[in-house]
Amino acid sequence: MKKYYDIGNGTLSRPVIDKALKRLAELLREENKRVELVAAGGVISVMLFGSRQMTRDIDVIIPQKDKVLVAGLVETVAKEQNLPSGNHAWLNDGVSFFGLQTRSTKKIFDHPNLVVFTASWYELLGMKLSGAWRRDADFNDAVHILRQIGSKDKEKALKESIRYKNFSPHTDEQTYKKRFDRTWKDAFE
């Protein structure tokens, strides 16, 4: 049976994401606001790696001071472009439950009124390896992230990424290390 993990789940393809983020940026410009978000999840695989064609949503951290404004504008874009809205909106801060701790300099979207950065590669790897790990796409994402780190120092990569292990769902250290070893092997050996 053919695996379709490279297709990804959801309805948000690169063109759909670009269009939605551009519209959100235009609405922010109309409000005379500039917002910086930090992203994690499938959007990075779609926008940077090209390893998935689609994702369900864009997981971001929204600055507290901008949450109400951004949430309202996200709903406007959802209505205009027939995108998911409400609790499962096309752009949401559900990842704030885990609390991203880092921000890289890598951008997946750059507009004068809206910039979307990625979290650090180590944090993204830590989150991915300690997540639910339900699909081949999760493994594929982890391989791409590890390759972005680029370090051939396996112990350093393990040490740096394990610091960002999710607390929920709980993944014990042994399981994390097994996932890391499998990912390392596929990425570099």
Image: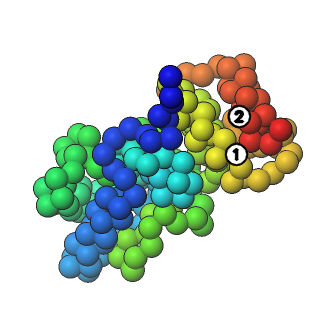
Residue at mark 1 to residue at mark 2: CA–CA distance? 8 Å
Q: Which residue is drawn at 78% across and 34% down?
A: 185
Horizontal and vertical percent position of residue 18 = 36, 64
Scheme of colours in the image: rainbow
Q: Is 98 situated left or right of 157 in this image?
A: left
Q: Which residue is drawn at 64% across and 47% down?
A: 145
**Relative to 94, residue 150 above or below:** below
Q: Mark 2 points at which residue?
A: 183
Q: Are marks 1 and 2 in contact (CB under 8 Å)?
A: yes
Q: Residue at x 60, y 38 (%)?
A: 140
Horizontal and vertical percent position of residue 16 = 31, 58
Q: Residues within 10 Å of mark 2 (few under 14, many from 20)?
A: many
Q: How many labels were placed on the picture?
A: 2
Q: Is 80 situated left or right of 2 in this image?
A: left
Query: Which is more toward the observer, 122 or 69?
Result: 122
Q: Is residue 44 visible?
A: no
| Sooner in the amino-acid sequence: mark 1 or mark 2 | 1
Please identify the quarter of the rendering in which residue 49 is found.
bottom right
Horizontal and vertical percent position of residue 82 = 16, 53
Label 2: element kind: helix
Label 1: element kind: helix
**Mark number for residue 146?**
1
Mark 2 belongs to which amino acid? Thr
Q: How crowded is mark 1: few (under 14 residues within 10 Å), some or many (20 or more)?
A: many
